[in-house]
Amino acid sequence: MQDIQSAPPASREKLMHALYEAAELEQNLMCTYLYAAFSLKDGEGEGLSAQEAEAVARWRRVILDVAIDEMNHLVAVWNITAALGGAPQFGRTNFPLSPGYLPAGISVKLAPFGDEVIQHFIHLERPQSSDEPDGAGFETAGPSRTPVPPRLTPAGYDYATIGIFYETLEDELRRLVGQLGEAQVFCGDPGLQLTSAQVGMAGDPVTGLESALAALKRIVEEGEGAPEHVDGSHFQRFVAVRDELRELTARNPAFAPAWPCAENPVLRKPPRPEGRVWLEDPEAVATVDLANAIYALALRLLGGTYLIPAQDSEKALYAGCAIGLMHGIAHVAARAARLPAGASHPGVNAGITFTALRNAAALPHGPSARRFYVERVEELAAVAASLDQSDPHCHSASALLDKMVQRLKGTPPPSPTSVSQ
């Protein structure tokens, strides 16, 4: 971290830039965790022993719970952004991220569950005092970001761990408040933020320095950079999964808890094919395409909530529908993990690609936005109905999307929905 006493003046613009990177970081972590969870097998019917099936079910729950935490962290970052008078960032870069896009040699790609993937997750969530190495195949040779002198144009912070990144954000918030005053810094309308009043995500509105720092502290303590002694941190939970995985593998060297999903699947022939798997199987392509579209709509709906005041019932409606769609992603992505990637990749299965749109911005609040959302979810529901309804994953996704159509068409908004359901 930079010396606060000698640092150049803090800037709302530069702080907003850092918060946008934080939003991208949380989204990227969430997607990689979900990809690993969706790749896991389910029960003895998929080749696991009773003991293995019980363990794998727990691991899935652990990884999904961590991904839910990342979603809560993302909301916290968005709320701080809105509190500063900014518009939350919903876009991100497609997988895999190019080396150097993030500092500290952080590698971000989609890969199925396995020892090396869990080790990678442990490395990402490691506290500052930990020397846990990265997982095999995730190491990067690229350097950290080149330090830049103070300029008007924002530049990304350099940091060794994610915890240090959030500590730097805390320091910058304190400095900006010291320069401008708390009321001037936190000038955004708190009613535009997303809180437990609309959806069962943790956290209260960010209204000042104390609540902003509390939100950042929770992010660090729950996962990124949490001290090693903190029970239940992401780091500790992933270490427990790794240790049990190695124990079961030692007992049964043939133990395969996950489907052989592709690393970094893509739906179009990539201009740079290295490190990517182009999906060719028609059923897999249709399934992954649907999963991606559900993901994109969920993000757009969440974005829309930040344009709607708290007293408007559509805020809770859009938030609830976004969370409901995320459950739909789980069904469709699990189906994709069980389908072949295509003839060019024998023995490799497909997987959701989490394709990011160039413009994931929220729509202007009003009747036109509702019309857009209804039309889009109807499109998704029609495609889901065309998939193999004898597959429980497809059937569940189709039923869920039909419910989303009815909710968005005018059914009274539901009570706040818990993201952990």
Image (cartoon, rainbow, N blue to C red):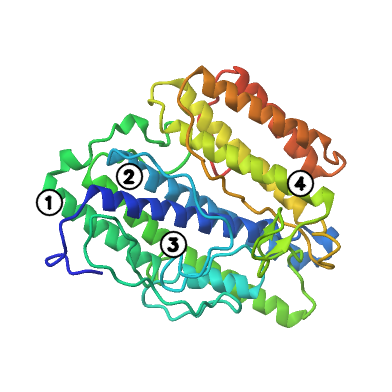
Nearer to us of marks 3 and 4 is 4
Nearer to us of marks 2 and 3 is 2
- Label 1 sits on residue: 178
Q: Work out whether 130 lies above or below 30.
A: below
Query: Judging from the image, what secondary structure is the residue with disc 3 in?
Result: loop
Asked whether disc 3 touches disc 1, contact meaning CB atoms under 8 Å apart, the reply is: no
Residue 210: where, in percent of width, then height?
23, 47
Q: CA distance from mark 2 to mark 3?
A: 19 Å
Q: CA distance from mark 3 to mark 1?
A: 29 Å
User: Which of these two is toward me, 171 or 358?
Assistant: 358
Q: Quadrant of the N terminus?
A: bottom left
- Label 3 sits on residue: 223
Residue 362: where, in percent of width, then height?
47, 34
Residue at horizontal 52 percent and vertical 55 percent from the top: 93
Looking at the image, tell me whether mark 4 or mark 1 is earlier in sequence order: 1
Residue at horizontal 28 percent and vertical 38 percent from the top: 85
Q: CA distance from mark 2 to mark 1?
A: 17 Å
- Label 2 sits on residue: 80
User: Which of these two is toward me, 225 or 366?
Assistant: 366
Looking at the image, tell me whether mark 3 or mark 1 is earlier in sequence order: 1
Q: CA distance from mark 2 to mark 4?
A: 36 Å
User: Which of these two is toward me, 2 or 43?
Assistant: 2
The label on residue 287 is 4
Residue at horizontal 12 percent and vertical 66 percent from the top: 5
Residue 23: where, in percent of width, then height?
43, 51
Q: How many marks?
A: 4
Q: Work out whether 414 lies above or below 64.
A: above
Mark 4 is surrounded, within 10 Å at the Cα level, by few (under 14), some (14 to 19) or many (20 or more) other residues, namely: many
